[in-house]
Every structure is written in structure tokens, then in C-alpha cells.
Image: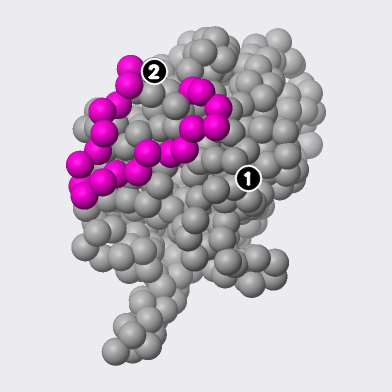
Amino acid sequence: MRAELEFRLPPLAPGRALVPINNGMPPPVREGEKWRGLVLLLASSLTIMAGATIAPSLPALEARFAGQGHAALLTRLVLTMPALFIALCAPLAGLVADRWGRRPLLLSAVALYGVAGLSGLVLDTLPSLLVGRALLGVAVAGVMTATTALVGDYFLGAARSRFMGLQAGFTSLGGIVFLTVGGVLAESHWRAPFAIYGLSLILLPAIALFLAEPPAATRRGEAGPSDETSGAALWVGLAGVFFAAIANSVAFYAMPTQLPFFLHTLGVPEPSRAGLAIGMVNVVSAIMAFAYTRVRARLGLTLVFAFGFALLATGLLLTARAGGFGDALGAMAMVGAGLGLIMPNLASAALQKAPARVRGRVSGGLTASIFIGQFISPIITQPAIATVGYAATYAWLGGMVGLVAFAALCIFIGQRFRTE
């Protein structure tokens, strides 16, 4: 991978310092360091697997439990229940990462992830499925917080931004695979996609072999303006990033939770086609994420937010106007373009502001914000759909996201005036 030639991870031996890029000429990358980059990418893909894998199963799952009260809402919560527990547990995971280390947290979280994910193969009531999904959320909180903190530990400056783009693109590609396979498996039985979670257990030996715990001196020793920021000022500065993360998740998760049902109303009932439509988001998101470094170099951090949210708003408005499967595919492409820029930009903005000594807690705060939005998405959209329908709900979400884009543009203009 090209991006792997542009950074150097800290060596395995404790006490050694990070080796920065000198004059644009990166030092050679050791074989073990290449493997560590790949393992980090694979671990990051578990976060998209948590929800994407079973999204195409939702209509069949709702039909299976149709006799239970509030089946429509509870079925959607099966998809988003992990998000609530990620949001609740991510700040605690951040404290654990800062105090006891990233690697132990990641190993235990991946083990729990595999067990909790596979529980859907045997549990046979909606309440028990929701418990299994809650435990999956606890696991994802640990995985996402640990991997984000490790990226902050292993990479500096522009190399960090490059890896964030690579990470977001790789995660999107994983979403394509999981959605496609999940859609195919869902046509045989609604339980079948849960088997995919077992793949996570294969990562445990790779994490143990290739991801060394960064020495405490390395985690505390990165100099920079962000180290001078502390206390309330730090978290006030991060509030805008966290709010953007919530808004992005509320809008985006109206796709996997509601699009299969919307396609039903358009005469497209097949789970595999729903998986293909949602997978389109991931295809375009991956392309844009791989281009993120170049886009950010041209536009800057704030303007990337404005551009990304404008693309997302356009995709949601096109979804509202969709009259068939082809229209939906085009709208999903636009949604994916926005998402591919927003996600790496969120992580880059948070880590740029975070002092090294609290990087785990900032990573936990970002993780919590992302998944608060995911959890409340169906709680917001389901009543709206029941009242005004799918098209109007998607149009309303597009307008909300458009306001975020406008706010980012205003901040960018204000920054330009202050520097002139």
C-alpha cells in the first residue's frame, strides 16, 4: 500500500522514540511495521462489520418476530443497540487505554466481539438478541477507542492524516464485503449473517504478534501546541467535532436502518439488492477516503467538513426524490462521497486537538459521539417516517446536514478573515 511507504511505526523495543519524516523522505519501513499497519486496518474494519453485516436481514428479522409488541422499532434496535453501549462505554474505554494500555484493551475487546457477535446464531427472542448486541457494543467501544489511540501514538503530522484516509477507505471496503455477503446469506436465513462475526477471532493472534504497546514515554512525549491545551478549553474545542460526528451518524444511519424498507415501498423487496444499494455507499466512500489526503491538502480541515457535509446533504435529498432502484444507487453514491471525507476528517480533527497524555480519552469521546448518533438515528427517523413518510424524512435529514455544511463554511470564512 502506498501510504505504508510514508510512515514509520515505533519500533518494538521499549523506550525508542518515533522516527519522523525528514524533508519528505521517509525512512525504510520494517517488515514487522508493515504487518502492524495491516493489523490496525483489519481491526478498524470490525466497527463497520458490527452493523453492516446484518442490515440486509432486517425485513426477515421483523417478519420472524412480527407477533411481538413494538417489533418494527425493536427490530431496528437490533441493528443499532451496539451503538448505545459503544456510546456509554467508549469514555470508560478511553480511561482504560490511557491508564492500562491500548494493546490489552484491544485484545480483550476483540475476543468479546467474536463471542457476542456469534450469539445471534443461537438466541431466539428479540430481548436476548438485544442483550447480545449490547455486549457487541461494549466490544466495539474497546476496539475503536484502542485502534484510534494507537494510530495517534504510531503516526505524526501528515503521516497520521494519510493513515486516517487509508483506514477510512479500508473500513469502507470492509463494509462492501460484509454488506454483500450479509445480503446473500440473508436470503437463505436471517440468522446466517451472524456467522460472519466469527472472523474477528482470527485477528487475536495477529494483534498479539504485531501490535506492541507504545511505551508510556512515547505516548507522553509528542511535543506540539496541542500539549499546551488542557482542561475545559480542550473539551470546548472538541465540542464542535463531536457534534459533527453525531449529526453525521444520525443522517448516515438512516440508510442501513431504513433503506431496505424504503426500497420495499419502491417495489424492490430483495435483501441482496438492499445490500447492494447500501454497499454503494461503501464503494464511493472508500474511493473518497483514499483521496482524503489530497483533498485536505487543497481545502484544509474546516473546508473539508463543509464539502463533505454538502455532499452528504445532496445524497439525502436525492434519496428523498428516488423513484426506483437506479435512483437509489445514484443517491447512495453521493452519500458515500460525503462520508468518505467526513469520517477521516473527524478523527484527524480530534487527534490534532488532543494532547498525547489524554489521547485515549479523546478517542473515546469521538467514538461515543459517533455511536450516540447511530443509536438515536432510528429513534428520530422511525416516528418521522410514521408521520410523514420516507421521502419527507430523508429530505428533512438532508436539510439538517446542509445546515452543518453551512456552519462549517461560515467558520472557514471567519478563519480566513482573522488571518488576513
| Residue sitting nearer the eye, 266 or 33 | 33
**Residue most toward the front?**
15
Tell me how many marks there are. 2
State the image coordinates of residue 341 (x, y, percent, origin top left): 34, 52
Q: Is residue 355 above or below residue 207?
A: below
CA separation, marks 1 and 2?
A: 24 Å
Residue at 26% x, 46% y: name it: 22
Q: Which mark is drawn over residue 57? A: none
Q: Which residue is mark 2?
A: 32
Q: Position of residue 131 (x, y in %)?
A: 77, 28
Identify the image quadrant of the N terminus.
Answer: top left
Residue 298 image offset from top left, x and y in percent: 21, 63
* Mark 1 nearby-residue class (10 Å; few <14, some 14–19, many ≥20): many
Query: What kind of element bears circle 1?
Result: helix
User: Does residue 196 sit above or below 232 in this rendering?
Assistant: above
Residue 202 counted in the magenta span: no
Residue 369 vs 303, above or below: the answer is above
- Mark 2 or mark 1, which is nearer the start of the sequence? 2
Say above or below: 135 vs 258.
above
Kind of residue indicated by mark 2: Gly
| Tag 1 residue | 360
For discs 1 and 2, the disc positioned in front in the rendered view: 2
Which of these two is toward me, 350 or 371? Answer: 350
Query: Does residue 383 appear left or right of residue 397 in this picture?
Result: right
